[in-house]
Image (spheres, helix red, strand yellow):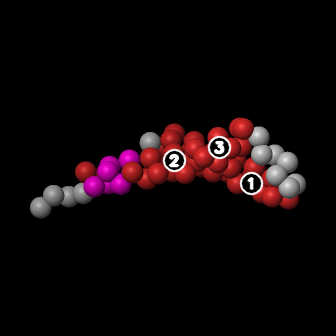
Amino acid sequence: MKIFFYFLLGLILVALTIDIYSYFNEGFFWTPISKIVNISTPVFLFIYLLIWFIKEKNEAPKQ
């Protein structure tokens, strides 16, 4: 789970770097790779948060 978190953090940093660079260069860096990164980042974020929520729910103390 920790590896997935660091992978997601790196993916978000790459996506932000690409977006900032393309904003200041009038979309110069809009390559297919940057489109894949920008589409996959929210997908991986949703999967990570879903796994984290399920894991926390299962570890909750039962009464």
Magenta stretch, residue numbers: 51-57
Q: Is residue 52 magenta?
A: yes
Horizontal and vertical percent position of residue 51: 38, 47
Residue position for label 2: 43
Which residue is label 1 attached to? 19
Residue located 44% across and 42% down the image: 1
Instruction: Give the quarter of the image for residue 6.
Output: top right
Residue 26 at x, y percent in the picture? 86, 55
**SS assignment at label 1:** helix
Query: Along the polypeptide, which appears first: circle 3 or circle 2?
Result: 3
Query: Looking at the image, do the residues carrying marks 3 and 1 touch, with CB atoms under 8 Å apart?
Result: no
Q: Residue at x 72, y 38 (%)?
A: 32
Q: Going from the N terminus, do you reach mark 3 or mark 1 first?
A: 1
Quarter assignment of residue 37: top right
Task: Check contact, mark 2 vs mark 1: CB within 8 A.
Answer: no
Is residue 48 visible from the viewing direction of this image? yes
- Left or right side of 11 for 24: right
Q: Which residue is mark 3?
A: 37
Structural distance between the alpha carbons of marks 3 and 2: 10 Å
